[in-house]
Image (tube, rainbow, N blue to C red):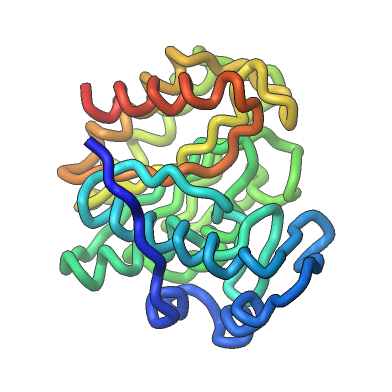
């Protein structure tokens, strides 16, 4: 079962972003670069608001937000790395407000470090951020020494596949989330760690994504997901379906 998303309100965007950043995106009237690899046009405001609002609805309903632009590189005060607003971060904040949750965990298995999500919640002990990502790699953060009480980075070597990712889940991700005891797990579901994806050097398969999703769903009473990366359009639909199978198994 599926439904159309909705646009986030400016009040919802301001849960994680500065008024100046929101105003800048709202005011784009012609194509321009917001950073060296993030372009905005006159339709970006609408698309980014729809992505953030749909992520919120996924968090509230226990769904999977199939959205673009992605969000996990977006910093509080600027766009970065194809990302305009922090979709999963905004969803976490909104879920805390609307559902009265005390603890939310975000598990990010996109191939790139979710530096924007980390920056938003670095000093917030009500949100646990766990990121598995190729390292060293863009954006250069999330290394083995980049840790905090509620920030867990799991740098993965290039060439890692299902076995390495599931071992990391077993030894690091699942214990960290279990200690935190979240009421909701939000998944930054990026599929650019797939073996055929052109932007990275990982070897995860459909089975690997299915199993990571299944394990995420077992970590808390509530789970929801938001699409991040994944740039091989021939394989992306099957990978999303595999994750949906895992979340609902």
Query: Based on the displayed image, in which of its 4 quarters is residue 132 positioned?
Result: top right
Report which quarter residue 196 is drawn in. top right
Q: Residue visible at 36% across and 62% down? A: 6
Q: Residue furthest right?
A: 36
Q: Residue at x 54, y 60 (%)?
A: 47
Is 206 above or below relative to 47?
above
Query: What is the x, y in percent for residue 56?
Result: 33, 60
Q: Nearer the viewer, residue 43 or 19?
A: 43
Q: Quadrant of residue 153?
A: top right
Does 84 sit left or right of 7 as displayed?
Answer: right
User: Residue 87 appears at what percent x and percent y?
Assistant: 47, 59
Residue 91, can we see it? no
**Residue 168 located left or right of residue 23:** left
* Residue drawn 67% across the image and 72% down it: 78
User: In the picture, which quadrant includes the C terminus?
Assistant: top left
- In this view, the residue in front, 117 or 23, is 23
Image location of residue 86, percent across then percent down: 51, 62
In the image, residue 11 sits, relative to residue 93, either above or below, namely below
* Image label count: 0
Q: Is residue 45 left or right of residue 107?
A: right
For the N terminus, give its image quadrant. Answer: top left
In the displayed structure, 238 sits above or below 140; it is above
**Residue 148 can be seen, yes or no:** yes
Residue 73 drawn at (x, y percent): 62, 56
Residue at point 64%, 16% (across, down):
195
């Amino acid at each position: 079962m599926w439904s159309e998303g909705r646009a986030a309100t400016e009040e919802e965007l301001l849960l994680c972003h500065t008024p100046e950043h929101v105003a800048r995106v709202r005011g784009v009237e012609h194509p321009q670069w917001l950073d060296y690899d993030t372009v905005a046009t006159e339709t970006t405001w609408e698309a980014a608001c729809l992505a953030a609002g749909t992520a919120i609805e996924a968090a509230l309903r226990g769904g999977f937000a199939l959205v673009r632009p992605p969000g996990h590189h977006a910093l509080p005060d600027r766009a970065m790395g194809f990302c305009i607003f922090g979709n999963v971060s905004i969803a976490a904040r909104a879920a805390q407000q609307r559902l009265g949750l005390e603890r939310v965990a975000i598990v990010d298995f996109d191939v790139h470090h979710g530096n924007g999500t980390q920056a938003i919640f670095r000093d917030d002990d009500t949100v646990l951020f766990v990121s598995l990502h190729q390292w060293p790699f863009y954006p250069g953060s999330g290394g083995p020494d980049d840790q905090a009480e509620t920030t867990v980075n799991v740098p993965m070597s290039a060439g890692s596949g299902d076995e390495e990712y599931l071992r990391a889940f077993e030894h690091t991700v699942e214990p960290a989330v279990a200690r935190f005891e979240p009421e909701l797990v939000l998944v930054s579901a990026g599929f650019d760690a797939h073996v055929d994806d052109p932007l990275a050097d990982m070897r995860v398969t459909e089975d690997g994504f299915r199993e990571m999703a299944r394990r995420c769903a077992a970590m808390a009473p509530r789970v929801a997901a938001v699409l991040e990366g994944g740039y091989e359009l021939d394989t992306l639909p099957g990978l999303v379906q595999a994750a949906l199978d895992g979340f609902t198994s």
